[in-house]
Every structure is written in C-alpha cells, then in structure tokens.
C-alpha cells in the first residue's frame, strides 16, 4: 500500500510539474519573444520564421531609432511625473483616511465605512466623473491624471484593517507622554506599517504606469500625453511620428515592426526593475492586510 501510494505521488508530481512547466513556457515565451525580437536585425526578423528563440542577426537599430523619438521620451517623463504624484497623493490620502476611520470612537464611522464599501460594487461611472473633472477645471491638467483615482477603496480598507490591529497600549502610552494624533500616526503607526505601505505603493505605481483611458479623456495637449497613449499610437495606429523615423530605411515595414518591440521593452522596463526591490514586502504586506482583517 505504501509503495503504491508513493508511486501514485510520484506520478502526480510528474504530471503536475509537466503541466506547470507548460503553463510557464506559454506565459513566458511571448515576453521572451519581444525581448529577442527587439535585439534582432529588422530585415531578418521581418522575413524569417515567426518562431524565435534567439536574436536573429543581433542589431540595435531599433533602439537607435527610438532614441530619436522625442515624443516618446517626452511621454516617458510625463508618466514618471504622473506616477510620482499619484504615489505621493495616493499614499497620503490612504494613510490619513484609514487612520481616521480606524478610530472606533469616531461618530458615524460605521455609516462612512458602509458608503465607502458601496463604491467597490457600484462605481459612479465615467460620465459623472468626467463632469466633476470639468467643473473642477482639471481638463488638460496634469492633476486630471492624479486626483480622479487618487484613492482606492481596496487600499484604504487594507490599511484600515492593519491600523485596527495595532495594540491600543502603543497609542495609550504615546498619549501619556503627550503625543497627539499627528505624532502617533507619523512616528508610531506609519513606521510599523511599512510592509503594507510598500504594497499599496506598488499597486499605485503599477496602476498609474499602465493608466491609459484617463489620458484619452481628460488631456488635449499631446505634450502632456503619458507613455501608454504614445505606445498605443505606435502599436495600433502606426502614428506618433514613427513613419518619419523609419522612412529613411530601405525596408520601412521591417524597421517599423522592430521599433514596436523595442517600445514595448522600454515601456515595461521601469516596473520590471522596481518590482524586485518591493517583492520582499509584497507577500508580507498582503498577508498582514488580509489575515489581520
């Protein structure tokens, strides 16, 4: 019985590992293909097989073309600005809001939490949000990329549940020593909540970096467009000055295709570089917000 069970376990593990390996390959190959294609010779890549494991005629021509795309780098700088502002404003509002709502003695706390929870299931909609942005005079402003999505209900609840699990003795001891709410929040609670704050920051950064629809609705000036809008123009519309940059090459279509792969690499690189530094906080922060909640 023990031998048959061991054999069954080995067979199960073999099948399980095989399936997981196939899923891994299917998931990673598109990413690997884009990386390899960006370093391949545009002419050889365009006319060769669609299956690609290694660079086909190593070339940096596509990267050289991208370096001359001034609008792309302008949008890159815009996106970095939007991400920085969204992270600072989002964290500030989330921390302050969750601290206030975590005070059980707050009058109407339960009603406010209920109203906030409702927004997770029933959003206001695009048109009401647009009308609010118009009335606030934020159309074609950088703040239209920050304020409409400055705070997330999910992030607020995750931070709120963490603050609620802090021992009351910490706050009581601080108040005996003369500390007010600002001191308790900034010097005691926030340092202890670093894992959760890091996770929320990661959520905000990734969400803001990938934000595309708000820019197409609220922004009119192309000089304020984020990277994702320019990326869409290059990948789908084939515009954004791409034609003028590749028109001087013999095989226009081949170089245009390589530039698309290169643009994808450059647009995802910052998040890929940032994630390893925040990964150690990710699981810990999510577990703290979930288990303690």
Image (tube, rainbow, N blue to C red):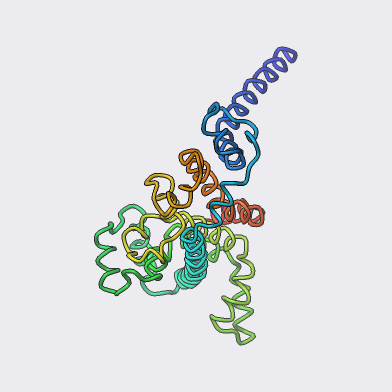
Q: In this view, does 281 lie to the left or right of 221?
A: right
Q: Which image quadrant for residue 30? A: top right
Q: Which residue is drawn at 31% across and 56% down?
A: 123
- Who's the residue at 44% across and 74% down the image? 105
Residue at x-position 39% and y-position 71%: 143
Q: Which of the 4 quarters of the picture holds residue 150?
A: bottom left
User: Residue 164 location, x and y as percent?
Assistant: 53, 65
Which quadrant of the rendered structure holds the N terminus?
top right
Q: Position of residue 255 (x, y in %)?
A: 51, 42
Is the residue 24 above or below the residue 114 in the image?
A: above
- Frontmost residue, 154 versus 221: 221
Q: Residue 181 in the image: x percent, y percent? A: 54, 80
Q: Viewed as shown, does residue 269 lie left or right of 226?
A: right
Give the x, y percent position of residue 26.
56, 30
Q: Does the image show residue 104?
A: no
Q: Which residue lies at the image location 53% right of the left edge and 28% below the top edge?
A: 50
Furthest residue toward bottom: 178
Residue 254 in view in this figure:
yes
Of residues 6 and 196, the one drawn nearer to the viewer in this rendering: 196
């Amino acid at each position: 019985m023990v031998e048959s069970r061991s054999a069954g376990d080995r067979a199960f593990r073999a099948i399980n590992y095989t399936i997981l390996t196939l899923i891994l390959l299917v998931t990673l190959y598109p990413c690997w293909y884009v990386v390899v294609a960006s370093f391949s010779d545009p002419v050889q890549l365009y006319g060769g097989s669609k299956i690609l494991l290694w660079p086909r005629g190593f070339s940096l021509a596509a990267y050289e073309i991208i370096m001359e795309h001034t609008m792309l780098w302008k949008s890159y700088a815009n996106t970095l600005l939007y991400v920085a502002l969204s992270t600072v404003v989002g964290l500030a509002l989330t921390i302050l809001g969750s601290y206030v709502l975590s005070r059980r003695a707050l009058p109407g706390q339960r009603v406010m939490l209920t109203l906030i929870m409702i927004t997770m299931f029933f959003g206001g909609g695009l048109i009401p949000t647009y009308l609010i942005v118009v009335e606030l005079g934020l159309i074609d402003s950088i703040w239209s990329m920050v304020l409409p999505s400055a705070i997330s209900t999910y992030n607020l609840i995750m931070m709120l549940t963490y603050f609620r699990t802090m021992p009351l003795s910490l706050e009581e001891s601080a108040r005996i020593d003369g500390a007010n709410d600002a001191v308790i929040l900034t010097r005691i609670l926030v340092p202890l909540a670093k894992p959760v704050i890091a996770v929320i920051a990661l959520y905000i950064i990734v969400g803001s970096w990938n934000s595309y629809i708000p820019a197409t609705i609220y922004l009119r000036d192309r000089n304020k467009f984020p990277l994702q809008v320019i990326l869409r123009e290059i990948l789908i519309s084939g515009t954004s000055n791409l034609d003028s940059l590749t028109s001087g090459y013999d095989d226009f279509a081949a170089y245009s295709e390589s530039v698309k792969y290169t643009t994808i690499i450059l647009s995802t690189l910052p998040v890929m570089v940032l994630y390893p530094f925040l990964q150690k906080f990710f699981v810990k922060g999510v577990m703290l917000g979930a288990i303690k909640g």
